[in-house]
Amino acid sequence: MVCKELTDVLCDYLEGTLDPETREELEEHFNDCPPCMAFLSTYKKTSNLCRQCIGQTEIPPALEGKLKSFVQNKLKKGR
């Protein structure tokens, strides 16, 4: 597994839904790649912070509209 491939399966890895072979391959990669291990740590921290913040902060309607528009435009461009 190369560094770029790990981003495709990182969410599944953290949720525990990867098949055992892929999980083992990914963990071997983490052991041999300090930058990816640092990325994993940052990803975990970011995910945890997002979960803690959900529902705690109200988004102003104008910002919510801009955010939705931005995401929709990005999704359309990615297709």
Image (spheres, rainbow, N blue to C red):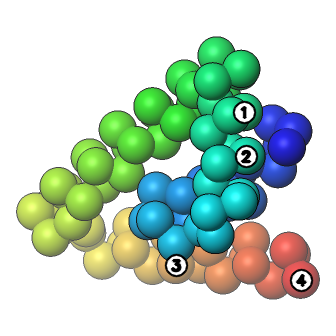
Query: Disc 1 to disc 3, how far (Cα)?
Result: 36 Å
Can residue 70 be seen here? The reply is: no
The local crowd at label 4, few if under 14, some if 14 to 19, many if 20 or more residues have their Cα within 10 Å, is few
Which amino acid type corresponds to the residue marked 1 in the rendered image?
His
Q: How many numbered marks have been drawn onto this rendered protein structure?
A: 4
Query: Which one is earlier in the sequence, the residue at label 1 or at label 3?
Result: 1
Query: Which one is earlier in the sequence, the residue at label 3 or at label 4?
Result: 3
Q: Which residue is mark 3?
A: 68
Contact flag, marks 2 and 4 (Cβ < 8 Å):
no
Q: Position of residue 18 (x, y in %)?
A: 60, 67
Residue 61 - label: none
Residue 25 - label: 2
Query: Which one is earlier in the sequence, the residue at label 3 or at label 2?
Result: 2
Which amino acid type corresponds to the residue marked 2 in the rendered image?
Glu
Q: Which residue is mark 4?
A: 79
Query: Disc 3 to disc 2, how far (Cα)?
Result: 36 Å
Contact flag, marks 2 and 1 (Cβ < 8 Å):
yes
User: Which of 54/71 is in front?
Assistant: 54
The local crowd at label 1, few if under 14, some if 14 to 19, many if 20 or more residues have their Cα within 10 Å, is some
Badge 3 marks a residue whose secondary structure is helix
Foreground disc of the pair 1, 4? 1
Would you place residue 62 above or below residue 39 in this image?
Answer: below
Which amino acid type corresponds to the residue marked 3 in the rendered image?
Lys
Contact flag, marks 1 and 4 (Cβ < 8 Å):
no
Indicate left or right for 39 with 74 as reference. left
Q: Position of residue 25 (x, y in %)?
A: 73, 46
The local crowd at label 2, few if under 14, some if 14 to 19, many if 20 or more residues have their Cα within 10 Å, is few
Residue 29 - label: 1
Query: Disc 2 to disc 4, how far (Cα)?
Result: 30 Å
User: Which of 29/44 is in front?
Assistant: 29
